[in-house]
């Protein structure tokens, strides 16, 4: 057994708000103003620990501490007598009537109801007398469990402490309230705080899946988590043995619940056990079981009054999920088995087959091969829910009499747990399997699942090796699984930024292919073949293979129609730039994953849908899809997927020039992603776009060029291809552009191999930006881009091209020609809600000599568009030489405009100009090529 640390833990995890309230209460007492607080929550939620915290913080106070005891609940004022005992020598200081009344009550002679207020005032006077020398804190733990008379007096006193240097701090059950006293409910801890509680109590940090599973078992209850740490064996802590399914039956929390249950009638306890074990979601099942046991629903009334359950027409609901667990875990084994058999007897063998088998299994000791077979058949395909099916297969493995059957069932249980969005449970089952099974086929299938977990949840670089090994192991016995493992390995190397390793994946996939492969296998092979060819620049071979994968994805039917196969087809569609088809396939994958409850693939399907929506120009839809994907990924523990969605959200916000939102998403990504990984690259892309918006062209170009090292297969090649238009736009401002030229060459080869008008339009725009200023080539390429831009989708990119073309024409001294393009850009950006880009188009229109709407700055009404832009740059600290370079003007022209600015604004220096702009709202920035 692991020995928990015995040192005092002074940090109360997840209770910052309550600790802050306690400190504020005591700080107020020290300043002469009293008050009270009620802390209420479930057993084990940390109420007593918060009182201990208050006692430590009240070192300079007189502390009176008491607790409500059920054994004294029938003795009036017993709790009050124990609480006040240390200061009863001050009773002599009270006026005679109050002194007499207080003594009578504390001596057990009771107090008439009409005199209860007078008694409360006597207690208040006693506390005031005790607080004359130093502030006073009175605490009563479990005030609702002791005598009600004490609770009533303390409530009256607590409401009358405002002008006294005294405080009352009470704790009670979750259902208790005290009118007129601020209350804080102790909610269950979140996963992070639960894991911190576990780590605080053990000598070494547990494996992540162990900690996550224990946190779930603990249900966010601090005492449950502490109890768990005290019973774990070393093998359990390392993940080598099955973990407890509930807090220990002899732990402190179980004792607390047992004490509550022992105060209930026997029939109520039996009904609670039936309700705790019934997971059918059908109230009729519970009623039939109660009838079979000779019980009535009315027997639950005492449990409802105690706040354990709510009885409604829709069934019995436990106030806390952990209460259900503790009721079941605290019952004797014989009673639990009898209740399980009773529930099995009233369930429909056909319509409720899986639940019935689960109850029979829970009532069975030792091996039972026939029941194990029944569990496996009933759980096949995730019937009843993937999580329930996983638990059923775990139990089937335990009932199996052959090691090979047990191993196969554990593997299926792990796969079902992963499908249900429970990666921690899946890992634990895989670890158990690895420790007990050496069969190559099982090992290979387990490797595929382990690699997928690594890819989605933690170490994508390690996932590639795991998946390649799994593919090698099963290649001779199951080519479909081997091909799926290779596709996942390819995804892993792309995610990690190791695209050079994709060549090996492609070679091995080619060796596995057969002429008459089933559609799903052929689809996966075409994806791998096509991506491998794309990454080595062989687009002539890549295109047919990828298009074939898209076609096959659209034809899938029957068992071959899975979210996994559809996402493969959607990924192929994105690489070959058939965005509409890719979106339809990804949308179908999302719908199918939701319909089947396959959380393991839902986040990936949403990621592909978001990318398709980005290319289709539906940025708002892409952002909403990414937000949905982020929620799903986080709920399913898929941290790598969550970071990809965060990266996509950061890029989409940056493209809208929404700096605050983009930086917030980048901060959420944090420093966890490995440099070169996809989330890291997406964050870099977003930062580069923000640099570009703010005119930091060199910084933007450097960031985007660093996303991948072309020719080496290292870095995020596919992300850099997506970001190439921004790289070229930034580099167009620089004298040396080798990285942009190389990236554009790669983009051109890809774009020309597709049938995508958008990719070709972006290619033409990039060439226009790199062409000599004012030349025929630039204008020709811009016009080609506008001709190619799709009219039905991609309005944002078309508007960006209109803006850049307008800037080019205006700076080529053709303002009249520029205005039409700038007006079109401004209108589109306004309709799309891209305010910053609309401001840039407005600024360019003003620079082209046209007045557009009311300017934002009072100074703007005095300046031309060119003068306003120069004044803004000066206010930002730019030199005349830097302004000339950014605006493609001579320094002499800048000097001339700046003198006019000074004259029109009535100022004499750059410092005054900076002050003028700092004191007024921003007029909007115009980005210059």
Image (cartoon, rainbow, N blue to C red):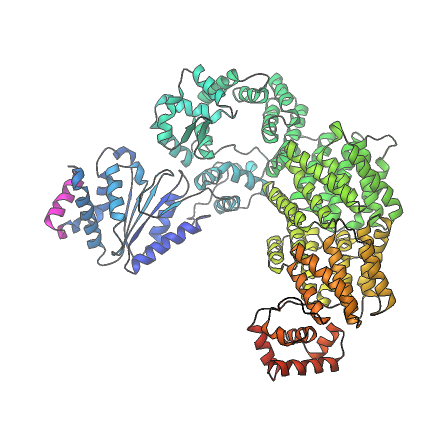
Looking at the picture, how far across and down is residue 403, in whole percent? 66, 24
Decide: is 111 above or below 701.
above
Q: Nearer the viewer, residue 236 or 208?
A: 208
Q: Can residue 467 be spotted in the picture?
A: no
Identify the image quadrant of residue 562: top right
Residue occupying image coordinates x 72% and y 36%: 564
Looking at the picture, how far across and down is residue 898, in whole percent? 67, 81
Q: Tell whether 381 sits left or right of 819.
A: left
Residue occupying image coordinates x 73% and y 42%: 583
Which quarter of the rendered picture does the C terminus lie within?
bottom right
Residue at the far bottom in the pictured view: 908
Looking at the picture, how far across and down is residue 871, in whole percent? 65, 76
Q: Tell whether 628 sits left or right of 774.
A: left
Give the magenta part as a residue range.
92-107
Q: Tell whether 125 sits left or right of 834.
A: left
Residue occupying image coordinates x 42% and y 51%: 17
Looking at the picture, how far across and down is residue 141, in whole percent? 32, 42
Decide: is 123 above or below 711.
above
Magenta segment, prevailing SS (helix, strand or loop)? helix
Magenta stretch holds residue 578: no
Q: How many marks?
A: 0
Decide: is 351 above or below 721.
above
Q: Can residue 853 be spotted in the picture?
A: yes
Residue occupying image coordinates x 80% and y 33%: 521
Magenta stretch holds residue 102: yes
Residue at the far left in the pictured view: 96
């Amino acid at each position: 057994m692991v020995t928990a640390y015995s040192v005092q833990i002074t940090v109360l995890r997840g209770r910052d708000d309550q600790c802050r309230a306690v400190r504020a209460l005591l700080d107020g007492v020290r300043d002469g103003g009293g008050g009270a607080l009620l802390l209420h929550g479930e057993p084990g939620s940390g109420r007593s620990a918060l009182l201990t915290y208050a006692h430590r913080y009240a070192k300079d106070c007189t502390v009176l501490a008491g607790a409500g005891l059920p054994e004294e609940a029938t003795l009036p004022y017993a709790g009050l007598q124990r609480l006040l005992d240390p200061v009863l020598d001050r009773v002599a200081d009270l006026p005679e009537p109050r002194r007499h009344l207080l003594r009578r009550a504390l001596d057990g002679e009771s107090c008439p109801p009409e005199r209860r207020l007078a008694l409360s005032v006597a207690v208040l006077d006693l506390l005031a007398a005790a607080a004359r020398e130093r502030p006073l804190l009175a605490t009563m733990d479990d005030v609702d469990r002791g005598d009600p008379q004490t609770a009533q007096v303390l409530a009256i006193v607590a409401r009358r402490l405002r002008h006294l240097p005294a405080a009352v701090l009470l704790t009670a059950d979750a259902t208790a309230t005290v009118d007129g006293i601020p209350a804080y409910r102790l909610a269950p801890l979140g996963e992070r705080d639960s894991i911190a509680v576990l780590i605080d109590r053990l000598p070494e940090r547990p494996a992540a899946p162990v900690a996550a599973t224990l946190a779930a078992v603990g249900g966010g209850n601090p005492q449950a988590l502490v109890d768990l740490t005290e019973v774990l064996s070393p093998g359990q802590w390392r993940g080598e043995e099955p973990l407890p399914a509930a807090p220990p039956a002899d732990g402190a929390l179980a004792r607390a619940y047992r004490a509550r249950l022992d105060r209930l009638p026997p029939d109520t306890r039996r009904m609670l056990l039936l309700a705790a074990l019934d997971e059918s979601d059908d109230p009729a099942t519970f009623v039939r079981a109660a009838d079979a046991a000779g019980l009535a629903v009315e027997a639950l009334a005492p449990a409802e009054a105690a706040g354990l359950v709510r009885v409604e027409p829709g069934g019995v609901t436990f106030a806390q999920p952990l209460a259900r667990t503790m009721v079941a875990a605290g019952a004797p084994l014989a009673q639990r088995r009898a209740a399980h058999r009773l529930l099995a007897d009233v369930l429909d063998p056909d319509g409720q087959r899986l639940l019935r088998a689960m109850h029979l299994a829970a009532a069975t000791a030792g091996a039972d091969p026939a029941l194990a077979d029944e569990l496996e058949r009933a759980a096949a395909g995730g019937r009843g829910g993937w999580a329930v099916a996983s638990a059923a297969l775990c139990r089937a493995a335990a009932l199996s009499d052959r090691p090979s059957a047990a191993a196969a069932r554990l593997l299926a249980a792990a796969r079902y747990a992963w499908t249900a969005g429970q990666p921690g449970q899946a890992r634990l089952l895989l670890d158990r399997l690895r420790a007990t099974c050496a069969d190559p086929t099982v090992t290979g299938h387990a490797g595929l699942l382990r690699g997928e977990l690594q890819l989605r949840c933690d170490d994508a670089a390690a996932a590639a090796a795991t998946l390649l090994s799994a593919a090698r192991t099963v290649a001779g016995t199951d080519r479909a699984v081997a091909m799926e493992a290779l596709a996942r390995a390819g995804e892993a190397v792309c995610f990690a930024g190791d695209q050079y390793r994709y060549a090996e994946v492609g070679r091995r996939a080619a060796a596995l292919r057969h002429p008459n492969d089933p559609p799903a296998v052929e689809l996966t092979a075409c994806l791998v073949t096509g991506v491998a060819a794309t990454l080595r620049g062989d687009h002539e071979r890549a295109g047919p293979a990828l298009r074939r994968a898209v076609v096959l994805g659209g034809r899938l039917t029957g068992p071959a129609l899975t979210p996994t196969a559809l996402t493969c087809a959607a990924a192929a569609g994105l690489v070959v730039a058939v965005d509409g088809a890719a979106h339809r396939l990804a949308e179908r994958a999302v719908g199918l994953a939701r319909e089947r409850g396959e959380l393991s693939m839902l986040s990936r399907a949403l990621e592909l849908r978001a990318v398709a929506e980005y290319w289709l120009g539906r940025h708002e839809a892409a952002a909403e899809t990414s937000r949905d994907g982020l929620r799903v990924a986080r709920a399913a523990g898929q941290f790598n997927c969550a970071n990809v969605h965060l990266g996509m959200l950061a890029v989409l916000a940056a493209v809208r020039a929404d700096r605050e939102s983009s930086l917030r998403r980048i901060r959420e990504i944090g420093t966890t992603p490995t440099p070169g990984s996809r989330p890291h690259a997406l964050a870099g892309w977003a930062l580069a776009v923000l640099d570009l918006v703010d005119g930091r062209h060199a910084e933007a170009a450097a960031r985007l060029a660093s996303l991948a090292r072309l020719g080496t297969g290292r870095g995020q090649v596919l992300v850099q291809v997506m970001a190439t238009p921004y790289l070229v736009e930034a580099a167009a401002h620089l004298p040396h552009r080798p990285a942009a030229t190389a990236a554009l060459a790669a983009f051109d080869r890809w774009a020309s191999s597709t049938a995508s008008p958008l990719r070709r339009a972006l290619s033409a725009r990039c060439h226009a930006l790199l062409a000599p200023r004012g030349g025929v080539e630039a204008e020709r390429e811009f016009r080609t881009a506008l001709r190619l831009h799709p009219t039905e989708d991609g309005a944002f990119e078309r508007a960006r091209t209109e803006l850049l073309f307008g800037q080019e024409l205006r700076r080529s001294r053709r303002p009249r020609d520029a205005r039409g393009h700038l007006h079109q850009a401004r209108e589109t950006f306004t309709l799309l809600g891209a305010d910053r880009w609309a401001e840039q188009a407005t600024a360019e229109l003003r620079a082209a000599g046209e007045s557009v709407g009311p300017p934002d700055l009072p100074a703007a009404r005095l300046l031309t568009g060119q003068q306003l832009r120069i004044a803004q740059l000066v206010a930002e600290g730019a030199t005349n030489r830097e302004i000339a370079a950014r605006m493609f003007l001579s320094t002499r022209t800048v000097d001339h405009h700046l003198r006019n600015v000074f004259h029109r604004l009535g100022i004499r220096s750059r410092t005054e100009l900076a002050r003028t702009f700092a004191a007024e709202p921003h007029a909007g920035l115009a980005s210059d090529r």
